[in-house]
Image (cartoon, rainbow, N blue to C red):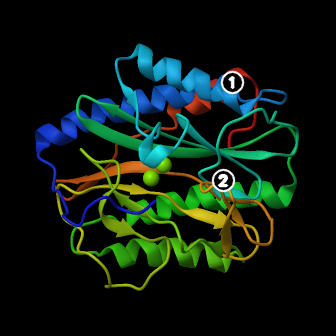
Amino acid sequence: MRKSGDKIYLKTPHDIEMMRHSAILLGKAHGEVAKYVKEGVATKVLDKVAYEFIHDHKATPSFLNYNGFPATLCMSINEVVVHGIPGKYELKSGDVVSIDCGVFFNGYHADSAYTYPIGEISEEVKALLTATKESLYVGIKEFKKGNRTGDIGFAIQRYAEQRGYGVVRELVGHGVGKLLHESPEVPNYGRRRKGDKLRNGMVLAIEPMINLGKENVVQEPDGWTIRTEDKKPSAHYEHTVALIDNKVEILTTFKYIEESLKANQLLVI
Ligand code: MG
Ligand code: MG
């Protein structure tokens, strides 16, 4: 998604402490949803699980009504890259589903996404998921003082393209804080030493969107759903990450998701 404003808001230690709470709550919301991610479940059922969990914890879903988005979760299946709208569709073996969620809690947003395999998926799609998740951490490693946003994008792009994947250009990571989408933009492609300087107090949502096939995407007539043009699958992993005292801290967590998957004896990517 595009940023909401041009100013880069550097966070104080207080802001970051508050954002840790938002991020942990988001991790737990994802973990609650993950308990129900399996064959036969309708995507709108998962959306309701997320809404109720967030609501019960005195927080607000960041995406619901954001520019008119009609749901708590973005649920993007197979060739859908991002911004899929939950509905009647029931997950089936061989699908991959990217679940993106944001929470607004005590004045601060957190934003995170995870792509799940459903039942048996092909080795080639499993490899895409693994590489996309790894590319997120490759990008996070470049979030350091003295680097620029282009260093993050360069690292993710190189990692993905070396493996023959397409890197989505139209959608980018972003600053996050009191607004869901703040500056700077954090593309998943780029050139070293280009882009905005990375500084202490920055909080970014880093979110590679990587396609099995070509990088090109199109928007469906619903005005939201973004899918690959070649209809090959896509994966998306996202963390909210802070730079504090020259150290990177991953504020969001996949821990609760992965605990739920293990409890259901499902594959952890
Ligand atoms: Mg997101
Ligand atoms: Mg995001």
Question: Of callouts 2 and 1, which one flags the residue occurring earlier in the amino acid sequence?
Answer: 1
- The residue furthest top is 56
Q: Residue at x 12, y 37 (%)?
A: 14
Task: Please determine whether, in this image, residue 257 is positioned above or below residue 252.
Answer: above
Task: Please determine whether, in this image, residue 165 is positioned above or below residue 131.
Answer: below
Q: Residue at x 51, y 18 (%)?
A: 52
Q: In the image shown, does 156 or 50 lie closer to the viewer?
A: 50
Q: Amino acid at mark 1?
A: Val
Residue 167, by quadrant, is bottom right
* Element marked by disc 1: helix
- Mark 2 is surrounded, within 10 Å at the Cα level, by few (under 14), some (14 to 19) or many (20 or more) other residues, namely few
Disc 2: which residue: 222
- Mark 1 is surrounded, within 10 Å at the Cα level, by few (under 14), some (14 to 19) or many (20 or more) other residues, namely some
Q: Where is residue 142 shown, x and y percent of the image?
A: 37, 68
Q: Residue at x 38, y 84 (%)?
A: 192
Q: Which mark is residue 258?
A: none
Q: Is residue 32 visible?
A: no
Q: Where is residue 145 shown, x and y percent of the image?
A: 22, 68
| Left or right: where 123 falls relative to 12 | right
Q: In the image shown, does 27 or 5 lie closer to the viewer?
A: 5
Q: Where is residue 65 shown, x and y percent of the image?
A: 45, 39
| Left or right: where 25 falls relative to 223 | left
Q: In the image shown, does 63 or 54 lie closer to the viewer?
A: 63
Q: Mark 2 and mark 1 in contact? Answer it, CB < 8 Å.
A: no
Disc 1: which residue: 45
How many angstroms separate mark 2 from mark 1 (CA)? 20 Å
Q: Amino acid at mark 2?
A: Asp
Image quarter (top left, top right, bottom left or bottom right) of the C terminus: top right
Q: Where is residue 194 shown, x and y percent of the image?
A: 32, 84
Q: Nearer the viewer, mark 2 or mark 1?
A: 2
Q: Residue at x 37, y 60 (%)?
A: 174
Residue 184, by quadrant, is bottom left
